[in-house]
Amino acid sequence: MSLIRGTALLGFADLVSQLNGDPDRLLAAYQLDREAIGDHERFVSYRSVAGVLEAAAQATGAGDFGRRLGSRQGLEILGPLGVAARTAPTVGEALLAIENYMSVYSPALTVGVRAEPAGSTATFEWRIDVSRPPVHRQAAELALGVACRVFRLLAGDDFLPLSVQLRHEPLVDRSDYVDYFGCPIDFSASRYGFVFHARILKRPLRSDSAVHAVVQDYLDTIVVPTTATTVDAVIRLIRRTLPTGTLDLDLVAEQLAQHRRTLQRQLAAQGTSFARLVDHVRRDEAERYLRDTDMPLGQLAGLLALSEQSALTRACHRWFGASPSQVRRSARSLSGAPVE
């Protein structure tokens, strides 16, 4: 479900107005009810939220609009989920609560924290889990801006990520990102997220076990049911492993604790196959990278686990009826981004 709480745009109208824009016109253009904005009890379309953020950046000339809005939001946008986090015994358990109940805030989004085995670092990752996702560069920067603020609230004002990963090219000067996040930035990365010291996860919080238990019980009653299928699970795994170049059916089946033949039968029963899903993910990723980044085509072919650039060219002709360069130029002209 492509939905998100109205608090996702908390502060939107004020920020647009301060930048001499017209928030009502922008919201109306994306069929967003002004009364729902900032209201945790109301769900709005995630596609509309992503779209209005991009439109606001263009209308106001603020390429950093998402991050500016992120500086105005914090744990409060999560409602009772934020309470569950603040009453957890440690930072790690607070983040686990957010991960487990993220669908209460938005079924369209997932977040995760993973500590490196026997390592000193951990990663936070933010993902949008909808088919054919809309342009969401501003939404991603908003999400990471809010995530850093949440980490500072939980772990302490001294928190800084070690590095930040963005899946798109910089929307403003690169130095602006470094100033904002306080660390090196990896653009055209394979994920949206950041790396941080794993020891932060063990920091104790001023927990309240009774309140924490009550809030979690409440969240269990309102958690948005997922309609995840085998296809959904396979697609998520393909997206994660495709950039590593190690993707194959046996690996995915192992991750799902299934025999490859069992997985093949389940996919066939749902009217698809592993090869079709890989092609589907490759198409989505190719479209996004061509639209949002200046990544060289040879590098993009490798990221999609294609044998060579010519394989990418053939695939683009099959998917889009055009070469990769033509797809990039067309996407840039439609989005208003500069075309080289």
Image: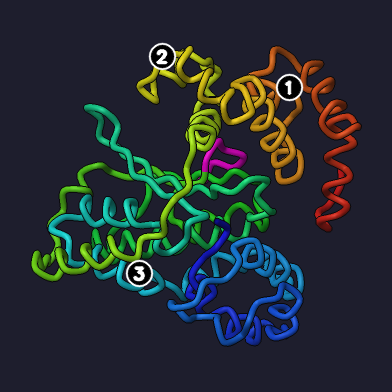
The image position of residue 225, as x and y in percent, is: 41, 55
Q: Residue at x 17, y 66 (%)?
A: 87
Counting from the top left corner in percent of width and height, residue 52 is at 68, 69
Q: Secondary structure at mark 2?
A: loop
- Magenta residues span 185-191
Q: Sequence order check: which comes first, mark 2 or mark 3?
A: 3
Q: Is residue 167 shown in magenta?
A: no
Dot 3 lies on which element? helix
Q: Residue at 46% across / 21% down in the picture? A: 252
Q: Residues within 10 Å of mark 2 (few under 14, many from 20)?
A: few
How far is mark 2 from mark 3, CA to CA? Answer: 41 Å
Q: Is residue 212 left or right of residue 252?
A: left
Identify the mark nearer the N-term, 1 or 3.
Answer: 3
* Residue 27 appears in the rendering: yes
Graded by Cα atoms within 10 Å as few (under 14), some (14 to 19) or many (20 or more), the crowding at tag 3 reads some
Kind of residue sitting beneath label 2: His
The nearer-to-camera label among 2 and 3 is: 2
Label 1 sits on a secondary structure element that is: helix
Residue kind at label 3, given as amino acid type: Leu
State which tag comes first along the sequence, 2 or 1: 2
Identify the mark at residue 259; answer none if there is no mark: 2
Quadrant of the rendered image containing residue 160 = bottom left
Q: Amino acid at mark 1?
A: Gly
Q: Are marks 2 and 3 in contact (CB under 8 Å)?
A: no
Residue 187 is inside the magenta segment = yes
